[in-house]
Image (cartoon, rainbow, N blue to C red):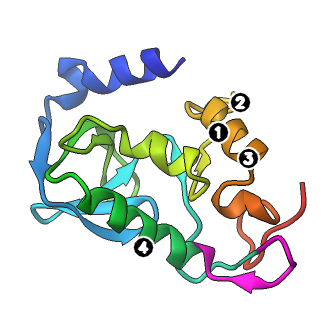
Amino acid sequence: MATIALALLTTPSACAAAGPLRGDASVIDGDTIKIGGERIQLYGVDAPEDWQFCRDETGADYQCGKKAALALEAFLSASRPTRCRFAGRDRYGRYIGACFRADGKDVNQWLVESGHAVSREENHDKGLYAAAQEMARSVGAGMWRGQARAEGSNHVAEE
């Protein structure tokens, strides 16, 4: 599944409008970066918004959205520049893409594996990064250390 989605992101028609973009990425939020003035929504992932809270293993609130953004910044800083391939634009005009660090590590997958984002469900499947999400959940990584995030909520809900 991941191979198919990545192939779609790298086809000439998908990239024709913009082509790959490479540069030092700045973090907008846990699943959005900016390179060369262009905002890029990371494809297949959904991180909590900056204002969202999660509950840790003790039940205490913490700013998981802010934590996701800071973790993404640290991850990207470890191997610059960042390179992105695009699948199109979202309804806000941002590019939607799969991004990679200079060392080749998949940024989108890392966000889910580290528990800082969830795999975005597409077309009634469990999402491109469902296996990475299950692994993060099973080891209690990131926001999975307490309670999983509920869509559209200020707090997370137990699943």
Packing grade of label 1 (10 A; few <14, some 14-19, many >=20) is some
Real-space CA distance between mark 2 and mark 1, rounded to the nearest whole angstrom = 6 Å
Q: Residue at x 73, y 79 (%)?
A: 154
**Distance of mark 2 from mark 4, alpha carbons?**
31 Å
Disc 1 residue type (three-letter): Glu
The residue under label 3 is 139
**Amino acid at circle 3:** Val
Q: What stretch of residues is rendered in magenta?
A: 56-64
Q: Earlier in the sequence, mark 2 or mark 4?
A: 4
Can residue 65 be seen in the rendering of this structure? yes
Q: Say if mark 2 contacts mark 1, CB within 8 Å.
A: yes
Residue at which label 2 appears:
124
Determine if residue 43 is in view: no
Q: Position of residue 150 (x, y in %)?
A: 77, 63
Q: Residues within 10 Å of mark 3 (few under 14, many from 20)?
A: few
Q: Quadrant of the C terminus?
A: bottom right
- In contact (CB < 8 Å): disc 3 and disc 2: no
Question: Which residue is disc 4 drawn over?
Answer: 70
Residue at 22% across, 39% down: 103
Q: CA distance from mark 1 to mark 3?
A: 21 Å
